[in-house]
Image (cartoon, rainbow, N blue to C red):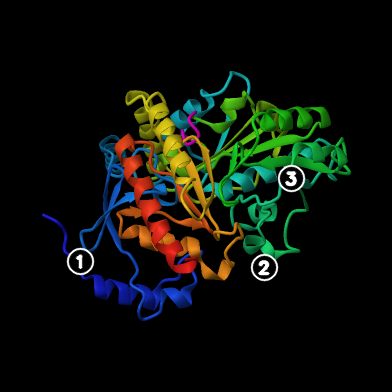
Amino acid sequence: MRDVWNTRALIESDKKHLWHPFTPMRDWCAQDHAPLILVAGQGAWLEDSEGRRYLDGNSSIWTNIHGHAHPKINRAIQDQLERVAHVSFLGTTNPQAIELASRLAGFFPEGTLEKVFLSDDGCTAVEAAMKMAVQFWQMEGHPNRSRFIAFENAYHGDTLGAASLGGIGAFHRSVAGHQFPVTRITSPEELDTVQGFHHGDVAAVVIEPLIQGAACMRTWPSGMLRKLRQKCDEAGVFLILDEVMTGFGRTGTMFACQQEDVIPDFLCLAKGLTGGYVPLAATLTTARVFDAFLGDVEEGKTFYYGHSYSGNPVGCAAALASLDVFRDECVLENLPPKISRLSELLVEIAKAPGIYETRQCGLIAGIEVRRRNGEAFPWMWRVGAKICLAARRHGILTRPVLDTIVFMPPLCVTVEEVEAGLQAIRAATQEVLMQVDP
């Protein structure tokens, strides 16, 4: 029997009390706006309080991997709750965190990324890597090495340190002057012209490998990551890879860096780590970095950074179950037909009026719309948001990045569901473009 929800009362209470992220709240609280209230999920589908079903076209903000209510992950969480829900990771440990660290390190060659620092979410994984890098150089006798190099249009999170890496003004402009020093570039070739890159004041280079998410799903050229690794090695600079979005199968391999055989000095993971169930993040690094923090207490080498829910056993249990699903259900092995069909559909949709460009990396896609004359729509028109709102009527939920419509379903999606999702986006796009650019 389906639960019965008082949608009107829920909406009234939401508008009275809640403040939503990345949301123009004046529009949200407008009397004629009826927020969507999601109450259930199964597989790649979600259900709202009125019983309508939608394909989860953006994996619940890029987190869900194996679908909603997966029995193996559900059972793992339930079993852990029968034991203990949470214990401190400061001064104690737990079996789930121990096993998770071992299995994450096991994805990489022995003697590389063998140390795992657990935290809460993507930005804390990035912040941990940044602070480790800066403190490492301090303890190695290079306190001036505190500057980072990041890429234009990058996004690495919204906490102060992670936001300082961002190359999108809307996310960091309000806290300018309260951040790590950062130099932004557009390609590895520019590194040779950055003053201080070669054995100067640069601590690390940070990048989202293969594809930039918040930059409207912009893909990097093939071989670019390998070239970046080479240049960092030549300059003696750390390489930090932010795989918060690209990790856990999104690009077709478990991790994006594996496609170019690149091992970073720091690997930042979150979002899909628990299958998209609960918050958990991991920062993987090398013995070289870890060993620099070893010493007597009075030496001040301890890494004083952490969170109350670091190493949370429920999150770690969910993550272990997610890794089991990858193995038991041959998730990566089953991706190629889905990725191939998505490629074919993107070629077709690119021919439609108003579609400026389609971009793809594995099971991640961006569909950019523009005016018929090729010019971008004024940002305040919020054309992408209107398309995503219209797409709900066709049975799909997703979000845009400006006027790029994102399609990033859970990896459990079927070929038929990929086809239905792209058909829904195409129909919604044409409806809206006929109104705003007839």
Q: Earlier in the sequence, mark 3 or mark 2?
A: 2
The amino acid on which the numbered mark 1 sits, given as a three-letter code, is: Trp
Residue 315 visible in the current orientation? yes
Image coords of residue 62 (percent x, y): 45, 47
Q: Quadrant of the N terminus?
A: bottom left
Q: Please name the residue shown 67% across and 68% down the image.
A: 174
The answer to which image quadrant residue 397 occupies is bottom left
Residue furthest to the left? 1
Give me the C-alpha separation between circle 3 and circle 2.
Answer: 23 Å
The amino acid on which the numbered mark 3 sits, given as a three-letter code, is: Thr
| Magenta stretch in the rendered image | 248-253
Residue furthest to the bottom? 31
Q: Which mark is residue 223?
A: none
Name the residue that disc number 1 marks: 5
Q: How dense is the environment of label 3, judged by Cα within 10 Å: few (below 14), some, or many (20 and up)?
A: few
Q: Which mark is residue 174?
A: 2
- Report the side of 378 relative to 231 (left or right): left
For the residue pair 254 and 119, the one nearer the viewer reads as 254
Q: How dense is the environment of label 1, judged by Cα within 10 Å: few (below 14), some, or many (20 and up)?
A: some
Residue furthest to the top? 110
Name the residue that disc number 3 marks: 186
Image coords of residue 60 (percent x, y): 40, 51
